[in-house]
Amino acid sequence: MTPLKPSKIIAIGRNYIEHARELGNEVPKEPMVFFKPPSSLIGPGEAILLPGVCQRVEFEAEIGVVIGRRLRNADSATAERAIGGYVCVNDVTCRDLQKVDGQWGRAKGFDTFCPAGPRIATGLDWRSLELSCRVNGVERQRAKATDMHFSIPDLVSFLSGVMTLEPGDLIATGTPAGTAPLHDRDTVEVEISGVGVLSNPVRLDGK
């Protein structure tokens, strides 16, 4: 079971320069914002289901920021103080639908496409966070929070200028280079230093 019950899941695209480049995209001048529905959340050990309409489903390991108090129009220093904790996130993406649709709601919104956990870690300095991802025990992604194009406090500040952030809201801060397809019977692990390991099996959706 996921430790989160957010009113909204806000995600950031192309926040690591190398990931933007590997997909042939420019680094945005402002944070690129999209949403994942709360119905996409699952917890550790729960299966990521591969929909039959998707030909290429990819993992995207991310540092998740959990908002600790209500925030609106905050500067970066205030935004940093409003962070309640950090959590491992996998922004699972149907890459082929993402390209076909031209917007990302369907490609990133399927049930099970937002694993998060294993816990909300508090008292951490965002600058110390290091993110990694393994598929079947083989490391595929690794980056530090300080490698982000837009820093965590700046992201929270930016978003608070767009919408009110409520306690428990989840921000997925972008994925580094190395994303690749998932297949039936894979196991994908997202790890953040000081937070823990989020592990999920991958299965075909049998519905």
Image: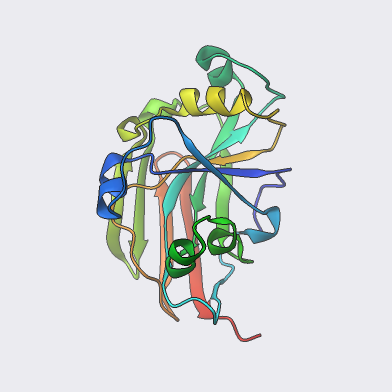
Q: Position of residue 39 (x, y in %)?
A: 70, 59
Picture quadrant of residue 26: top left
| Numbered-mark total | 0
- The x, y position of residue 180, in whole percent, is 33, 65
Placement of the C terminus among the 4 image quadrants: bottom right
Q: Nearer the viewer, residue 73 or 83?
A: 73
Q: Position of residue 178 (x, y in %)?
A: 28, 56
| Most distant residue in the bottom direction | 206
Q: Is residue 146 left or right of residue 184?
A: left
Q: Where on the picture, by quarter, is residue 163? A: top right
Left or right of 147 on screen, residue 126:
right
Viewer-nearest residue: 205 or 28: 28
Residue at left 37%, top 70%?
181
Q: From the viewer's perspective, is 171 left or right of 145?
A: right
Which residue is painted at 37% across and 29% down in the image?
128
The residue under the point 33% across, 59% down is: 179
Q: Is residue 77 above or below residue 53?
A: above
82 w.r.t. 50: above or below: above
Residue 41: image x %, image y %?
64, 57
In the picture, measured across the screen, residue 137 lies left or right of residue 38, that is left
